[in-house]
Image (cartoon, grey):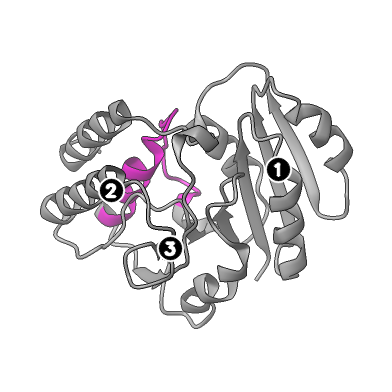
Amino acid sequence: MKLSVIIPVYNEVKTIEEIVRRVQITGLADEILIIDDGSSDGTRDLLAHLDGQATVRVALHEKNRGKGAAVRTGIAAATGEVLLIQDADLEYDPREYPNLLQPIVEGLADVVYGSRFLGGPHRAILFWNMVANKLLTLMTNILYNTILTDMETGYKVFKREVVIDMPLHARRFDFEPEFTAKVLKRKCRIYEVPIAFHPRDYSEGKKIKIMDAFEAVWTLIKYRFVD
């Protein structure tokens, strides 16, 4: 199956080249779609050199519109049968790709989530972020009658057919709850696999904020009752 890796990026000049290198050395990505969401730190200069390399294509947002908007641009441009979302920092390791893809390759899943809470190795920081993630996942499970362990994970892999006719409206970090709500309501087969996770703290450039948690709550409630 052809794999499209979607990389939304905003002001990641220190990591973008390295994450692209790591994706490429897996040998699994048939195309790498980088969507720059209005970066102003020099990221775009690096992307100008990456664009057109082997499997790499770059799309530019002229102003910052949010991660969700960048992911939607990537989904619209992807040509693969399977799509994988890869953050542009180094928190998620592309060496996990074989494990993430296996349930789809074996015909067991339509969607795979890489869970940070199923026992994989991780850096021990950001307690309150973990609490917020687990509370949002609990809320997802209650509202949608499921047993996910990590709704907010950045590693989401899915067949193209899952999203081909799915209206997505997320602009920021509300992509995770919107996508999750809609695949659950459509009764897609979701598998979770454990992943290693290397979180950075806010001094290192982490972008998600507490207000994004409140937006996620509203998104989960809204799409539970609205098509």
Q: Nearer the viewer, residue 123 or 161?
A: 123
> Is 63 placed left or right of 203 in the picture?
right
Residue 178 in the magenta stretch? The answer is yes
Query: What residue range appears in magenta?
Result: 163-184
For the point 77% across and 56% down, the residue is 21
- The residue beneath circle 1 is 16
Badge 3 or badge 1: first in the primary sequence: 1
- The residue beneath circle 2 is 127
Real-space CA distance between mark 1 and mark 2, rounded to the nearest whole angstrom: 27 Å
Q: Nearer the viewer, residue 168 or 201?
A: 201
- The residue beneath circle 3 is 122
Q: Residues within 10 Å of mark 2 (few under 14, many from 20)?
A: few
Estimate the x, y position of residue 179 in percent, counting from the top left.
37, 46
Badge 3 or badge 2: first in the primary sequence: 3
Residue 209 in the magenta stretch? The answer is no
Instruction: Name the amino acid type tagged 2.
Output: Phe
